[in-house]
Image (tube, grey):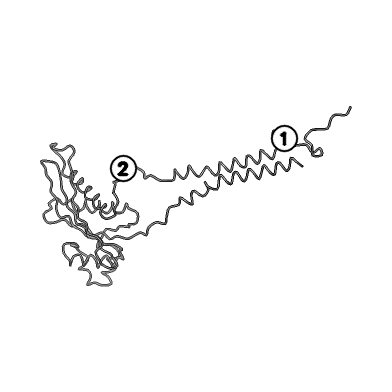
Amino acid sequence: MEMMVRLRTARRIAWLLASAIAIPYLSIPAMAAPQAAAPVRSVVMFPVEAADGIGNSQVGPELNAALKDALSSYQGYRVLVYSDKLPAVQRLVAMQPDKKALTTGPFSEDEAAVSRAMTLGKAMLADLIVVGSADKYVFNDKDGTADLSLSLQVFDGATGKSVQTVAVTGRGVGRPQRMEGVSETAVMRDAVNDTVRKTMKAITGEEYLEPRQGQSPVIESKKRSKVSWIPMLLLSLGVGVLLGGSGGHGGTSAPATGGTENPPPPPL
C-alpha cells in the first residue's frame, strides 16, 4: 500500500514539473505570432515618359520595369502597369466608346494628361495611381557616368487627391572609372537602379535592396523550429519519469506478498 502511494505521488510531481516547464514554451508561438498583415493596396502605374531631350530610348522602358519590380517587392502593394490592352480598359471602351481617346498617352505632361490617367485608374478601381516622367538624362562618356532625374506623382484612386510628389536624381558610375570602352547601357542601368532605390525610399520610407540572383529570402521558421521541439522533449521526459516510476525500483515490480517488499524466510 505504501508503494502505491509513493508511485501516485511520483506521477503527480512529474506531471506538475513537466507542465510547469512546458507551458511557457508552448505559449511562445502564440505570443510570437505576427500581427495581422496590412491591407494590400492596388497600384496602377502609368508608363514613365521620357522628356524630349533624352536621346537614349532605353531609359523609359528600363525605368518602367525597374519601378514595377521594386514596388511589387514591398508587402502591401499589388502593382499593375497600365496598358490599353488590359481587360478593364477594353471594357470601359466597349461601354463608353467616347472614352477611347483617353486610353493613349501621354499621362503626365500636363493637367489634361494627368486627368486622363485618373479616369482610367478609377475605372480599374485602383487604390493608388502613379504617373511620372524622366526629366533629364546625361551620359558623360569621358568620366563614364550617367545622371538621371525622375519625377513621380502619386494620387488617391478614390478621391483623386495628390498623395505624394517625388523628385529624385540617380547616378550611374562606370566600373572602373575612366576606362576606355565603358558601356553606356551598363552605366545607364546603374543610374536607373540608383534612381529607383531613392524613389522607393521616398514612397515607402524603407530602403530597397535589389535581390541577388540565387539568394533566398531569410525566413524566421528556423527560430520557430528550435523552439518547437523543446515542449516535445520536456513532455517525453515527463512520460519517461512516469513510466520509470511505475515499474518500481530497478524496473521490477514488487511481489504481492501482503504489501511487504521482502519475501518470507524459507521454512526450517
Left or right for 86, reference 148: right
Assess whether mark 1 and mark 2 are in contact (beta carbons under 8 angstroms).
no
Which comes before the other along the chain, label 2 or label 1? 2
Label 2 secondary element:
loop
Report which quarter residue 222 is drawn in: top left
Residue 98, image x, y percentages: 22, 72
Q: CA distance from mark 2 to mark 1?
A: 63 Å
Residue 139, image x, y percentages: 13, 46
Residue that extends furthest to the top in the rendered view of this protein: 268
Residue that extends furthest to the right in the rendered view of this protein: 268
Is disc 1 surrounded by few (<14), some (14 to 19) or many (20+) residues within 10 Å? few
Compared with 252, 151 (above or below) is: below
Quadrant where the C terminus is found in the figure: top right
Residue 73, image x, y percentages: 32, 51
In this figure, what is the number of numbered marks? 2
Which amino acid type is marked by label 2?
A: Gln
- Residue at 21%, 45% in the rendered image: 190
Residue 6, image x, y percentages: 71, 41
Camera-nearest residue between 139 and 98: 139
Residue 201's tag is none
Task: Name the residue that disc number 1 marks.
Answer: 252
Quadrant where the N terminus is found in the figure: top right
Which amino acid type is marked by label 1?
A: Thr
Give the label, 2 or 1, closer to the camera: 1
Report which quarter residue 68 is drawn in: bottom left
Task: Name the residue that disc number 2 marks.
Answer: 213
- Residue at 78%, 36% in the rendered image: 255
